[in-house]
Image (spheres, rainbow, N blue to C red):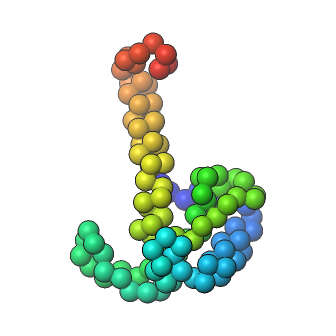
Amino acid sequence: MPWDKERYPSDWDERAKARKEQAGWTCEQCGAKQGEERWGKLKKRSYTVWLAAAHLNHDPENPHARLAVFCQACHLKYDSSLHWRTRYQRKRTRMLRAGQLPLFADEE
């Protein structure tokens, strides 16, 4: 899912940096450190860890959002259900616009 900076508060960069400093520049899920070299389990190659401040409620517009610090892999795992749900909704919308009838009457 592309990052839409317009949805974030104007001081997002400062908030994200402060949260990463609070976490000691360490992934709160797996313990990976910012800039550390790791070996990928799926692609079997080396990569550099970059940390991100993640919205625990997926609400970037919230100026008082709860944030966690995750590496790329943990952030993707955390957001996976959101990605699948968004993918399903977009696919369903495309099908309905193309003329596909809904399976149940209450889906319209």
Residue 4 percent location from the top left of the image: 59, 56
Q: Is residue 5 above or below residue 108?
A: below
Instruction: Return the x and y of residue 49 as percentages of the image width and height.
Output: 44, 79
Labels in figure, total: 0
Q: Is residue 45 left or right of residue 97?
A: left
Q: Is residue 60 above or below residue 48?
A: above
Q: Residue furthest bottom?
A: 36
Furthest-left residue in view? 44
Residue at 47% from the left image edge and 58% from the top image edge:
78
Query: Which picture quadrant has residue 19?
Result: bottom right
Residue ID at (60%, 57%): 56
The residue at 57%/82% (across/down) is 25
**Viewer-side residue, 100 vs 105:** 105
Q: Nearer the viewer, residue 40 or 24?
A: 24
In the rendered image, the vertical position of residue 96 relative to residue 70, given as above or below: above
What residue is at 48 percent from the left and 55 percent from the top?
79
Q: Nearer the viewer, residue 102 or 39?
A: 39
Residue 52 placement: quadrant: bottom right
Quarter of image, res 14: bottom right
Spot the residue most to the top.
105
Residue 85 against residue 5 in the figure, above or below:
above
Does residue 27 show up?
Answer: yes
Q: Is residue 3 left or right of residue 46?
A: right
Q: Is residue 28 left or right of residue 102?
A: right
**Residue 93: % across, % down:** 45, 30
- Foreground of the two, 73 or 92: 73
- Asked if residue 6 can be seen in this view, the reply is no
